[in-house]
Image (cartoon, rainbow, N blue to C red):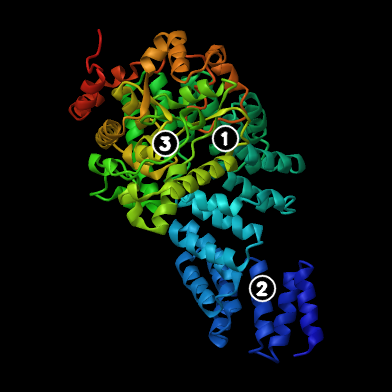
């Protein structure tokens, strides 16, 4: 086979002339019918013409003639995938990886295919292998981070994306979109918005960028900008696809809800319908609109659909939470008995003023409101929710799982090192201001009281408390990022058990450790905000409460609030969240016997006032 013939064919392909390349290939193959390079170039020319049915047999023939070539198996897999044969493509990628484990390309492609097939754990394993082979590749690190986030490995994704700023400029628009999507999954919304703003300045007609950026602007409480950037997508002449218009309608519905127009939101949602079989968010939105319109039965019907679809999707990343014998609320935290605690050695630990202030409570009990109040005080500094104690426990578990069975084995050096690790993790998340006390708000840190007490025994803790029925209803109406929490909220019955089990565990551990705890009742805070704010300030030994009374102004000035109540805490305290469950009495009544121990303990009534 003459080199100049191959050069001509290759030049034609590179010049975007696949028809000419095909003609040259077929002419040359008449003399050399089994030539490897000619067969490959012919298959490529047909693939470029989108004649996949003709290209596939040639790629297959190359794997038969040269079965030990990882490259041919990878090419064959890629065209199978283009043709929609996912299962066959996966098998071909697996073979390409087996033949050349050091070849990063098929591993990357296989990982992306596994993500598409929702096999997130396998995708993460394959893509982390690819990262080990090409640790400097932004593309592979971004893909691996996506897989980590999809299987709830937020810390793995954080480590992979740590150097992302050093990758800029990426000089690859689609890779920049991918990075923005992954940063959004990671809840790094301001950073993702910056990436998309840069892209949109260069490509104002990129509708997918507009859609994602408008979504992020809504999350950043920049409603006017969200609507402005969305309008070109809904313009009939913009050339938006059906999928893009549907996504735009859903975002417009969100904006309508934010602007107190639930009727308009509902109309948009009913006209557009869900974006696919996995669109549980559509039904959560529809339920929110119906709730605001007072359409209780329609709201509950939409919520049942939302949780049915969500449970089906979450089984892909966390199947263990959806087995028949799964606990109501998954818990990784250790329990400590009174006998164990009595054997704990006395260790040197920080005083209260040098310890974090912990804000805990069952989700949707008002923890974000408390956090924003505290963060408004110049002497305090808060941050978005972070699973620091889960990470510290993982460190201990990896060292020796028996440690979590008896925290009393931790000695002075161990606790000092764990505190250093805690503060190092905090420093990764926020720029600490001098002379401020840290506020660590994470509702389910109430499960980690033993670890908190071992490291910060003098810490002051605020427990956010709210009527259990309002908490249950609010959680049921919410889609949570955590699959464990989403599973706990999948039915009202399971959610009620999760609440009682979590609160019972807290009360038992509080009885053992006797930590310094202030109970802040949501209802009391709303009824007499100045008095309750003064009470919290006194507990924390703060002199000037006035900044805390203006928390809503402080919250509006913040770049980003990363919790589900981001749209509520920018408003002054109001009574909207009190007694919402009364409208849903018929749905709540069956779970009242489950909640009864906590209703009785905290002195809440299950009666609906006339």
With 426 as the anchor, is 445 left or right in this view? left
Q: Residues within 10 Å of mark 1 (few under 14, many from 20)?
A: many
Question: Is residue 119 visible in the rendered structure shown here?
Answer: no
Question: Nearer the observer, disc 2 or disc 3?
Answer: 3
With 547 as the anchor, is 501 left or right in this view? left
- Quarter of the picture containing the C terminus is top left
Say which residue appears at 56% left-offset and 14% top-offset. Answer: 550
Say which residue appears at 21% left-offset and 29% top-offset. Answer: 591
* Secondary structure type for disc 2: helix
Location of residue 212 with respect to 31 vertically, above or below: above
Numbered circle sitting on residue 479:
3
* Secondary structure type for disc 3: loop
Question: Nearer the observer, disc 1 or disc 3?
Answer: 3
Whether residues under marks 2 and 1 lie with C-beta atoms below 8 angstroms apart, the answer is no
| Cα distance between the residues tagged 2 and 3 | 45 Å
* Secondary structure type for disc 1: helix
Figure quadrant of residue 378: top right
The foreground one among 609 and 596 is 596
Label 1 or label 3, whichever comes before in sequence order: 1
| Cα distance between the residues tagged 2 and 1 | 37 Å
Label 2 or label 1, whichever comes before in sequence order: 2
In the rendered image, residue 452, in percent from the top left (x then y), is placed at: 40, 38
Q: Which residue is mark 2?
A: 44
């Amino acid at each position: 086979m003459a080199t100049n013939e191959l050069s001509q064919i290759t030049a034609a392909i590179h010049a975007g002339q696949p028809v000419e390349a095909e003609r040259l290939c077929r002419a040359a193959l008449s003399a050399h019918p089994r030539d490897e390079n000619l067969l490959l170039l012919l298959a490529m020319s047909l693939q470029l013409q989108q004649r996949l049915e003709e290209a596939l047999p040639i790629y297959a023939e190359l794997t038969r003639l040269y079965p030990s070539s990882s490259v041919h198996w990878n090419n064959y897999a890629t065209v199978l995938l283009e043709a929609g044969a996912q299962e066959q493509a996966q098998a071909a990628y697996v073979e390409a990886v087996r033949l050349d484990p050091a070849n990063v390309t098929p591993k990357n492609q296989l990982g992306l295919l596994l993500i598409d097939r929702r096999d997130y754990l396998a995708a993460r394993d394959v893509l982390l292998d690819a990262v080990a082979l090409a640790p400097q590749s932004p593309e592979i690190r971004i893909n691996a981070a996506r897989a980590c986030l999809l299987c709830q490995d937020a810390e793995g994704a954080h480590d992979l994306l740590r150097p992302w700023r050093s990758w800029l400029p990426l000089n690859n628009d689609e890779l920049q979109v991918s990075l923005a999507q992954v940063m959004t999954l990671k809840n790094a919304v301001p950073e993702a918005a910056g990436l998309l703003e840069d892209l949109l300045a260069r490509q104002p007609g990129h509708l997918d960028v507009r859609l994602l950026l408008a979504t992020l602007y809504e999350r950043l409480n920049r409603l006017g900008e969200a609507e402005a950037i969305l309008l070109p997508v809904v313009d009939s002449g913009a050339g938006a696809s059906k999928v893009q218009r549907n996504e735009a309608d859903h975002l417009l519905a969100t904006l309508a809800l934010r602007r107190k127009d639930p009727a308009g939101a509902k109309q948009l949602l009913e006209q557009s319908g869900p974006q696919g079989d996995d669109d549980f968010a559509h039904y959560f939105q529809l339920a929110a609109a119906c709730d605001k319109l007072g359409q209780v039965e329609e709201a509950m019907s939409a919520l049942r659909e939302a949780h049915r679809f969500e449970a089906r999707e979450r089984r892909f990343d966390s199947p263990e939470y959806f087995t028949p014998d799964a606990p109501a609320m998954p818990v990784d935290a250790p329990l400590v008995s009174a006998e164990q605690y009595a054997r704990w050695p006395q260790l040197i630990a920080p005083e209260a003023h040098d310890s974090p202030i912990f804000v805990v409570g069952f989700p949707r009990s008002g923890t974000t409101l408390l956090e924003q109040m505290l963060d408004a005080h110049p002497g305090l500094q808060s941050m978005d929710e972070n699973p620091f104690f889960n990470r510290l426990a993982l460190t201990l578990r990896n060292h020796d799982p028996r440690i979590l069975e008896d925290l009393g084995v931790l000695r002075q050096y161990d606790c000092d090192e764990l505190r250093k690790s805690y503060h190092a993790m905090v420093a990764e998340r926020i720029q600490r201001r001098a002379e401020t006390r840290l506020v660590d708000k994470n509702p389910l840190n109430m499960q980690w009281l033993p670890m908190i007490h071992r490291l910060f025994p003098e810490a002051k803790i605020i427990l956010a408390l709210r009527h259990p029925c309002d908490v249950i209803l609010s959680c049921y109406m919410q889609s949570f990022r955590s699959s464990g929490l989403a599973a706990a909220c999948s039915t009202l019955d399971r959610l009620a058990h999760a609440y009682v089990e979590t609160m019972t565990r807290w009360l038992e551990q509080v009885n053992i450790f006797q930590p310094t705890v202030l109970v802040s009742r949501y209802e009391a805070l709303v009824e007499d905000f100045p008095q309750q704010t003064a009470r919290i300030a006194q507990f924390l030994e703060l002199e000037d409460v006035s900044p805390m009374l203006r928390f809503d102004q402080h919250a509006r000035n913040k770049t980003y609030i990363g919790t589900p109540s981001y749209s509520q805490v920018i408003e002054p305290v109001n009574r909207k969240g009190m007694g919402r469950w009364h409208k849903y009495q018929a749905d709540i009544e069956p779970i009242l016997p489950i909640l009864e121990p906590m209703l009785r303990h905290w002195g809440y009534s299950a009666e609906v006032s006339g």
